[in-house]
Image (cartoon, rainbow, N blue to C red):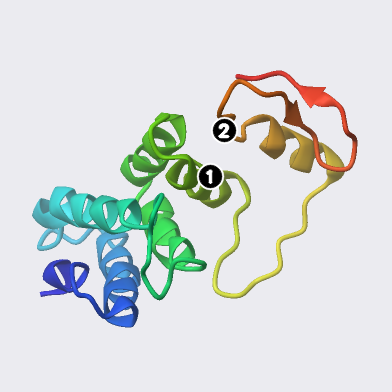
Amino acid sequence: TLIAATQRNDVMVADRAATSLAALAVRRQKEVEPLRPRIIEALKNLFAKLGDGCTRADADWGYRPVGNALLRLAPEGEAVLQAFMDQRQDKRLAELAWKTLHIRQDKGTFSEVTEKENDEAFKKRPVFGGGPRLLPGKGSEAPAH
């Protein structure tokens, strides 16, 4: 099944299964709706593999297809990403969840944002170690949320 395919060691198969599951789930068909919690759980588990210490072949880019699949399953998928962003045990996982939620990019598109939108996104960036959060290009501190 596609849900089982998200657990495969072949990252291309797992990542493609994630995008296919999202495409099925957003249709909200009565046959698929009972599987929605299992789909979200499978995507959550796959995204979690991309955190600290990840050695997967898709370590640098796998968060995009899996994260975008979670975004398509709003609001539950967004809540999963927010929880990853808010946790403080895995810095890389929090950063990837933040990028997915606040620096959106889908299907190779270029995302244009205003300076204000960019500043707002960076204010939400997870901070680890209690250090100041710097706004991009400004060198000024942004308040932690």
Residue picked out by circle 2: 126
Q: Quadrant of residue 110?
A: bottom right
Q: Position of residue 89 (x, y in %)?
A: 38, 33
Kindly indicate whether the residue at mark 2 contacts the one at mark 1 (C-beta within 8 angstroms).
yes
Residue depicted at x 36% and y 70%: 56
Q: Please state the horizontal and vertical placement of residue 4, each as a whole percent of the image.
A: 12, 69
Give the numbered dot on residue 49: none
Position of 87 with respect to 118 (left or right) is left
The residue lying at 88 percent from left, 33 percent from top is 139
Helix, strand, or loop for circle 2?
Answer: loop
- Mark 1, other Cα within 10 Å: few <14 / some 14–19 / many ≥20: some
Q: Amino acid at mark 2?
A: Pro
- Looking at the rendered structure, the kind of residue marked 1 is Glu
**Residue at the disc numbered 1:** 95
Q: Quadrant of the C terminus?
A: top right
Residue 48 versus residue 6: which sits nearer the camera? 48
Q: Residue at x 51, y 67 (%)?
A: 60
Is 19 on the left-hand or right-hand side of 145? left
